[in-house]
Image (tube, rainbow, N blue to C red):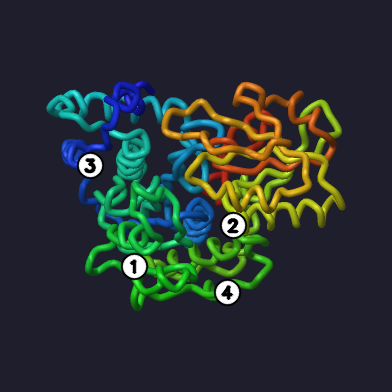
Amino acid sequence: MDVFYREWDRRAPGASRDLGRARALASVLGVLGPEVPVLTVVGSKGKGTAATYASAYLAAAGLRVCTVTSPALRSDRERIRVDGRAVSEEELAFLGSVLDEAIAALPAPAGGYLSPSGLFTIAGVVHARRVGADVIVLEAGMGGRSDEVSLFPPAVVAITPIFREHAGVLGDTPAEIAEEKLGVAGAATIVLSAPQPAEVSRVLGDVEQVENGGSGLVAELLPGGLVRGSAELGVAAARRVPGVTEPPSGRLREVLASVVLPGRLSWHEVPGSATRLLVDSAVDGTGIAAALTAARHAWGAIDHVAVCLPDHKDLDGAVAALDGLPVTFVRLPLPHLRFTRPLPPGWDVVGADAVTPAFLAALGRRVVALGTVYFTGLVLDAVGAGTERLFVTAASRRPS
C-alpha cells in the first residue's frame, strides 16, 4: 500500500502533481485507452452521490460497473468498487504491486509527484480491465483537465454544482474553476450539468442542465435533501452512456432502493450509548443549514454539533448557520488541509485523535457531525458504520 502514498509523502515543498508522469504510468500499464465507456463526474459538491447513482443505474441495466471515488471513508478499499462493493484487501494489494512494478520502469521524479488520488484512479482502471467491467465511472479528485481522470477520455461527463472552492489552485473565480473542470471533456463527449450559478452557466454554454425531475425517475427512487439533484444528475448521465438500455423497472427499483450514502444525511447510533448521530459532508452554509433542519425535524432539538472545515471551505457560512448551537471544531493533522482561520470564541477545539465513541456520546443524545469527507469518514469509522457496499445487485450478493 506504500506505493499509493510514497511520492506524496516524499514531495518537496511547493511540488505539484505530475500529470505527465501519471500519463506515462498509465501507458506502461496499457490502460490509456480503455476499451469500455467511461463516465466521469466533476464538480465542487455532490460528486460521490452522482457517481453512486450513475453506477447503480448502470448495474441495474445489467452492466458490470467499476467505480473509482475519492477520498475514501473508512478504508482505501472503498476507492475502487465493482457493482457497488469495495475491493478486497487482497485485490488492492495486488493492484499496489502492479503499480509498484510499473512505476519502477519510469524515470525518477523530476520535481513533481504521483498523487494518491491519481494512483487510485489508474489502479481502478487497471482493475476494471482485470474484472471485465463493461463501464467505468470515475469521480475526479479535485479538478478536471488537471486531474488524472483526464487521462481516460470520457464518453459522458456529469458536472455537479460548482462554487468557489480551491480558489487559487483551480482558478480564482467560479467561472475559472468551471472552465478547468469542463476541460476534462473531449469534442465527442456528452456533457450534462446540474443547475449552476449564472457565471458558471455562461462558461458551460449550451451544456444540457438536468433540472428537478430530469432523471425521469419517480421521487421515491431518489434520496431526499440537497443530494437529490446530484443523484438525478448521475442517473441522467448513466442513461446517456453509449449502448446502455433501460433497466427492467422492477430491477431498477430494487437496486436504487438498496443505495446507501454514508456521510450524506446518514443516521447512526453511537456504540454503547443512547446518542443518536446525524453525519453529513456539508461544507457550506446552505448544506449545513439543510442538515440542521433535517436533525431538528427528526429530533426536535440538537444537543451539539461537531464540525470540521478546512480554510478553503465556507467557514463564514457555517458560523452563520451554527449560531446559537454548542459547537466543537475538529482539526485534522493532514498536511494538505489548513486550519488557520479564526473561530468563534465559544467553540471548543479538539484534534482528530479525540473523535472516539466516548467523545461523541459525551456531546449529548442528539449530535450532528458536519464537514469535509476526511472528517465524516473519521466519524463513520468511530461508530462502525457500514461502508463496504453502496448498493446491491445480484452480482454483488456474495458473502462478506
* Inter-mark Cα distance, 3 to 2: 36 Å
Q: Which residue is mark 3?
A: 19
Report the front residue among 376 and 250. 376
Q: Position of residue 139 (x, y in %)?
A: 41, 50
What type is the residue that disc 4 sits on? Answer: Asn
Q: Which residue is mark 1?
A: 242
Q: Nearer the viewer, mark 4 or mark 2?
A: 4
Q: Which residue is mark 4?
A: 212
Q: Which residue is mark 2?
A: 255
Q: Is residue 39 visible?
A: no
What type is the residue that disc 3 sits on? Answer: Leu
Q: Mark 3 or mark 2, which has the lower sequence index?
A: 3
Report the front residue among 348 and 394. 348
Disc 2 residue crowd, few under 14, some 14–19, many 20+, Cα 10 Å? many
Residue drawn at (37%, 38%) of the image: 117
SS category of the residue bearing label 2? helix
SS category of the residue bearing label 1? loop
